[in-house]
Amino acid sequence: MGTRSRRLFAARAEVSHRGCSQPLQRVVTDFGADVAFGQVVGKLREHYGVALAPETIRGIVEGHAQAMFEQQTFEEDWPRAAGEPLVVAQMDGGMVPIVVADPAQVDRRKGKRLEWKEAKLTLAHAVGKTALHYGATLQGGVEEAGRWLLECAHRAGLGINTLVHALGDGAHWISDQVEQQFGEQGRFTVDFYHVSDYLAAAAKVCSPAPQAWLREQQQQLKCNRLATVLAALTPHLEPEDLIDAPVRTCHRYLSNRAHQLNYQGALAQGLPIGSGEIESAHRYVVQQRLKRPGAWWTLENAEYMLALRLNRANGLWQQYWDDCANARQVA
């Protein structure tokens, strides 16, 4: 006489043969948000004794990811309150692999090519508070990224009396959006460690002891002595027609961003001078799922999966499934 296994999760989750209940879809989406769809197959069997095909898993996860994407909105009418005194806002771009099919091919599996698309990620938080608020876009461009930066700042407590301390890697599109979105309330500072990379390259030309020279210039910048740093670079400027010119490149970079290097003021207020938070966020929000080895996405599905990752990072996971359950009851 054979034995029959009891699948407690299957009973509790209302799982039927060839059917995917909402509790099961939630589990599948939870796994699929973190690991490749093929790996979800093994996790379902290991933890719940449920067998689903990778194609079914993909459909469930991407379907809910699309729903989360379509629910994303910008709040147009924020209350005009005083707000938090200080909000830190950061923005950065990172590349995601995208598959583009050749429209001339009847078989869509042929003629594929890999391209890279920049995911523009934003975050903000009130100074002294740990709650981070995220936004991102793949297709929307710099204007939409700027709107997400503003949205995140509002969620973090931006009010009429708030000063926004914004950080980025020095890309003009980032500083331009800070100015456009926050006006006089925003103050953009170039990531100190990005500046240090330029100084480190120049140090190899400027001194026989490059590490000591670099530390000296870093300290000068932290004291807002940009003129001193530029003076240290000037005697070593390469000819203008030289292609490999790290000293001239550093000098130009610093000179063009002189108004974005107020490290002394930031440090005096206990504010960060590095954009490490946004760089880390790219790893755990974007790259952990969208940049896995062998992962290729269509642009639309990458945008949807990014929305799924943001949903969880912003703590909206429970709310989404509660809304799904309520919608099911109404139907």
Image (spheres, helix red, strand yellow):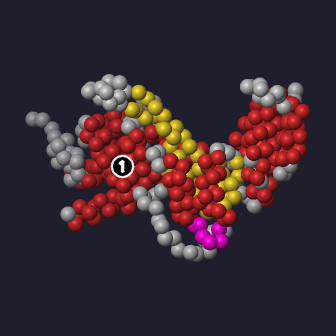
Principal secondary structure, stretch drawn in magenta: loop
Q: Quadrant of the C terminus?
A: bottom left
User: Height in image: 87 above or below 44?
Assistant: below
**Quarter of the image where one finds residue 71:** bottom left
Residue 251 shown left or right of residue 235 in the figure: left
Q: Secondary structure at mark 1?
A: helix
The answer to whether any part of residue 181 appears in the image is yes
What residue is rendered at 52% in x and 61% in y?
A: 151
The answer to whether any part of residue 280 appears in the image is no
- Point out residue 305 in the picture as x, y percentages from the top left corner: 40, 45
- Point out residue 92 in the picture as x, y percentages from the top left corner: 58, 46
- Point out residue 211 in the picture as x, y percentages from the top left corner: 82, 33
Taking the magenta stretch, the answer to whether it contains residue 163 is yes
State the residue position of label 1.
65
What residue is rendered at 53% in x and 53% in y?
A: 143
Q: Amino acid at mark 1?
A: Ala
Total numbered labels:
1
User: Height in image: 128 above or below 297?
Assistant: below
Mark 1 packing: few (<14 Cα in 10 Å), some, or many (20+)? many
* Magenta segment boundaries in residue numbering: 157-164
Residue 48 shown left or right of residue 316 in the figure: left
What residue is rendered at 41% in x and 57% in y?
A: 72
